[in-house]
Image (spheres, rainbow, N blue to C red):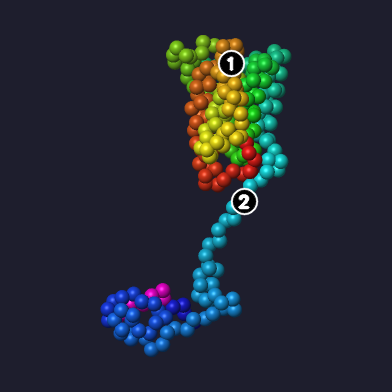
Amino acid sequence: MSRPDLFVVCKNCGAEISPYVTECPYCGRRVRKRAPRVEIARDGEPRARQRRMSRARPRRPRLPARSASERRPFVSGAVFVLSALLTFAAEIGVSLDELGALIPGQFEQPWRLLTAPLVHTSVAYLAIAAGIATAALRAVELRFGSVAALLAYLGCAVPASAVALAAGRSGLPFADAVAVVAGANGLAMGLLVAYVVERRLAAPGALAAAVDPLALAVAAVLILALPLAVPEASAAAAAGGIAGGVAVGLVLSLWRRRRGPLIDAGI
């Protein structure tokens, strides 16, 4: 049996009326001898509606949030392990150039934009810069997953290294007069800013509920002060990291609004 139309047009007045009436309610003109038969299923639902519902495209179910204990921070852990290994190599005498540090004014090897934040000249530099960077990256990874953490690393490391590289060539007052740029101070600043931006946009009070604001302030001061104590730490890299961190934080906030965080941890 063919499915009835949603409406019919009265030939007398032109009004759109229900296909289940025999007379037009507007002009009283008879439109048909009898109303069409409606097939009723056993559950009381019209068969035509059931057919429409069966042909409807099923929605993709939204995955439930996972707890922090169900996820492992592989990306942030790998970043710290690689940083520790490269720092150990630098301590035993391997040159920073061979380990992947940046040479200001040269751009023949763009892969150094990613490796320079992993190279540190001392254990203290590693503990401060890589420690803060790993903590912020771990918070992103536990909340959004490993793919988002990898993209956050790229989004903060590349701008930080690129600005440090460009500053070494520009001759600007804040440019670093050093032969090699190495370390995660720019990366750490970027990830810290990304975390703050995402948490501030999440909900009122979400940042203060997740982490102590004083701890964030101390971490930021330590990162900004590193160029004063470590020659290889670039102040320009910190500036580039801030720019990259703002962009990453906005992307993570958009990700959260459209897909939701992958876990329900309060971080």
Type of residue at label 1?
Answer: Leu
Q: Which span is picked out in magenta?
A: 5-11
Q: Which mark is residue 63?
A: 2
Residue 214 in percent (x, y) is at: 59, 24
- Does the rendering let one see residue 176? yes
Of residues 189 and 156, the one drawn nearer to the viewer in this rendering: 189
Q: Is residue 62 left or right of residue 9?
A: right
Is 114 covered by the magenta stretch? no
| Above/below status of 61 relative to 146 | below
Type of residue at label 2?
Answer: Leu
| Residue drawn at (63%, 39%) of the image | 266
Main SS of the magenta segment? Answer: loop
Which residue is label 1 attached to?
Answer: 226
Residue 179 in percent (x, y) is at: 55, 12
Q: Quadrant of residue 186?
A: top right
Earlier sequence position, callout 2 versus callout 1: 2
Cα distance between the residues tagged 2 and 1 = 42 Å
